[in-house]
Image: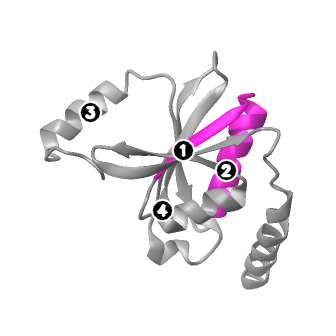
Amino acid sequence: MNQSFESTLDGQREWFEDYLTRDNDIYWVILNRRGDFVGTTALYNIDFVAMKAEKGRLITDEAIAVGGPFVLEAELLLLHFAFKELGLKTIYTTVRDDNVKMQSVNRKLGFEYKYTIDIRDVPYHYYELSLDVYNPEPFEPILEHWRKRYERAKA
C-alpha cells in the first residue's frame, strides 16, 4: 500500500470503523468455481450527481489467479454493474507507475490515459472509461474458452 505512515492494528481498526460509515463504496470478493478466495475489487467514491465512480483495490492471489481469467471477469463484472445497473457514465482509476500489468488491463478494457499525478510522492497514472467507449464484446471469446475448459474438466 502507498502510505506515508506506519500501519498499526489500532490504525486499521480506526480506518475500518470510519469506512463502515460510508455509503458510496461497493466491495466484491473474487472466488474461483470451487469457492476458493482469489482476491477483492471495489467500486468506490460513487457519485450519482457526476455519474462517475472509481474502480480499484483489485488485489489477487497470483498463485490462484493464474488458474483462470479471474481479473478479466472481475473487471468486466464491475464495469457492467457500474454502467448497466448503476447507470454511471464514467469510471476512473489511478494506477501506480510501476504497475504495468494493471495499466495493460486498463488499456485493453478501453480506459484512456489522461495524466500522471503524485499520490504521497509516488507517480500514478489517471485513466478514464466512458460508457460510450466501453465494449466488453471482444473479451467474450476468452471467457467462453475458459467456460468450456472448466466444463471439460468437470466431465
Say which of 137 and 61 sits in front: 137
Quick one: label 4, few (<14), some, or many (20+) residues within 10 Å?
A: some
Q: Position of residue 95 (x, y in %)?
A: 47, 53
The mark that comes first in sequence, 2 or 3, is 3
Q: Amino acid at mark 3?
A: Trp
Tag 2, which secondary structure? Answer: loop
Q: Which residue is mark 4?
A: 37
Measured in 3D between alpha carbons, the distance from the residue under mark 4 to the one under mark 3, in whole angstroms, is 23 Å
Measured in 3D between alpha carbons, the distance from the residue under mark 3 to the one under mark 1, in whole angstroms, is 21 Å
Tag 3, which secondary structure? Answer: helix
Task: Tell whether 40 sits left or right of 137.
Answer: left
Say which of 101 and 74 sits in front: 101
The mark that comes first in sequence, 4 or 1, is 4
Q: Which residue is mark 3?
A: 15
Nearer to us of marks 3 and 1 is 1
Tag 4, which secondary structure? Answer: strand
Q: Amino acid at mark 1?
A: Thr
Say which of 93 and 18 sits in front: 93
Tag 1, which secondary structure? Answer: strand
Q: Position of residue 128 (x, y in %)?
A: 63, 42
Residue ID at (78%, 47%)? 134
Q: Which residue is mark 2?
A: 111
The mark that comes first in sequence, 4 or 2, is 4
Residue ID at (17%, 47%)? 7
Q: Position of residue 152 (x, y in %)?
A: 79, 83
